[in-house]
Image (spheres, grey):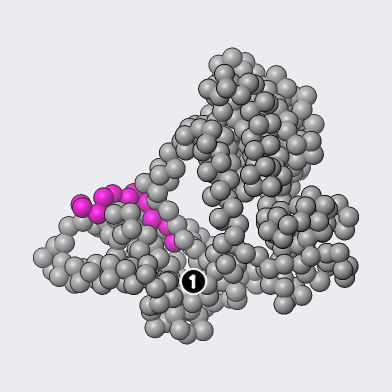
Amino acid sequence: MDYSQFPQHKVLCIDMKSFYASVEAVNRNLDPLTTLLAVVGDTERSGSIVLAASPALKREFNIKTGNRLFEIPKDPRIHIVPARMGLYLETSMAFTKLLNQYVPIEAIHTYSVDESFFFCQGLERTYGSAYDIAKHIQMNILQQLKLPCAIGIGPNKVVAKMTMDCISKKVGIAECRYEDVQRLLWPLPIGDIWGIGSKMKRHLNRLGIMTLGDLAQYPLDILKRRFGVMGEQLYYHAWGIDLSPVLVDPREDVRKGFSNGITLMRDYSKEEALTVIYEISDKIATRLRQINKAARTVSLAIGYSKTEEIRGFNHSTTLPEATNISKHLSRACIAIMNKENISGLIRTVHISVTNLVSDEVIQLDLFTGPEDEKLLRLGKALDGIQSRYGKASVMRACSLTESGTAISSAQKIGGHTQ
């Protein structure tokens, strides 16, 4: 591979170690690295999932994310605490603000609540090499937030991410250049690589691909025939090639579109799922009005219960006119459902809107204009009430039924209590 034709960026991938557990430890004036602590969704339910385990708990008792509460030993040294998503989001924002002290926001790509990409080109004259910059940031995070982190350094996001996941989490900071890819990354098991889930791992293993090096050496034409565009992407990622932009506009995703969805607490019938569609449509319409946008395309994704032997679907429809009215969004989704002829039990509902335009282009025709104008005024009035008094201050009557989710979701952030 001739790396000279590819960009040579300086990208840091920064991951906060055991983020939820570390934040909880710091909040209790405990050492996040030595404290035995688990964050669970519900401390009153023995089957509740462990959302985060401190490094010490992982090391001493092998308790990890995904374990159940009943699997945690009855040891008085172990702190078991409920999730507080509001606190974690607040800390995540403080983390981003800290990074923003070094570079403009366009050079920070927030990948998740506890992980960010950081484009550090141009800081060399102030802080030194990329490794020196990473060391300075790591120390600053520890001093200001009292949180440990791991940092991977690479010429692009993919290499920085793989380095962080597979090397930095063990040593703190690690760097991998293009010329280091074969030595540092190729020996890694294919299942440890970012973007390769358990299903893809099984497919690759059947082809005799066990390591990242095996993937890099596999014939590209066969990978493309077998996996399409994904096969080509995996091949180039195995060589450390990634052409995605390192500078991002955080507002760009909103301009393109956004989504909202829910994994239901139980299986729903088609009729019950309609309530959820109404509720999600309300949320998306509110968001559109807040940013003065309207959507031309609506997508509905339905996931069936594990008891069903049928695959879910994700279908889209383009509206005659752009809209930010909930009624039109829900109608579009219901039309997709009816066309799909749903008969199985439903477990996930997801709605997204794309092809966003300024709400100034919305045109009210002669026949539907008066009704839409009333719906728009009503929507804006409800937006104002919810903004002032909370999301649960006003809602649809159907949200008060057993199939409603609006009340419980209004009390949570990220699916957990605030």
Q: Please name the residue shown 15% across and 66% down the image.
A: 369
The magenta region covers: 351-361
Nearest the viewer among 128 and 391 is 128
Point 16% across, 62% down: residue: 364
Q: Is residue 354 magenta?
A: yes
Residue drawn at x 50%, y 80% is: 403
192 left or right, relative to 306: right
- Amino acid tagged 1: Ala
Q: Quadrant of the C terminus?
A: bottom right
Q: Is residue 165 left or right of residue 324?
A: right
Q: Position of residue 141 (x, y in %)?
A: 65, 41
Q: Is residue 172 magenta?
A: no
Give the structural element (helix, strand or loop) at label 1: helix
* Labels in figure, total: 1
Whether residue 118 is visible, yes or no, is yes
Residue assigned mark 1? 410
In the rendered image, residue 59, in percent from the top left (x then y), is placed at 86, 52
Closest to the observer: 31 or 153? Answer: 31
Query: Which residue: 79% across, 49% down?
Result: 33
Using residue 146 as the reference point, say whether residue 36 is left or right of it: right
Residue 192 point in image, percent of width and height: 74, 42
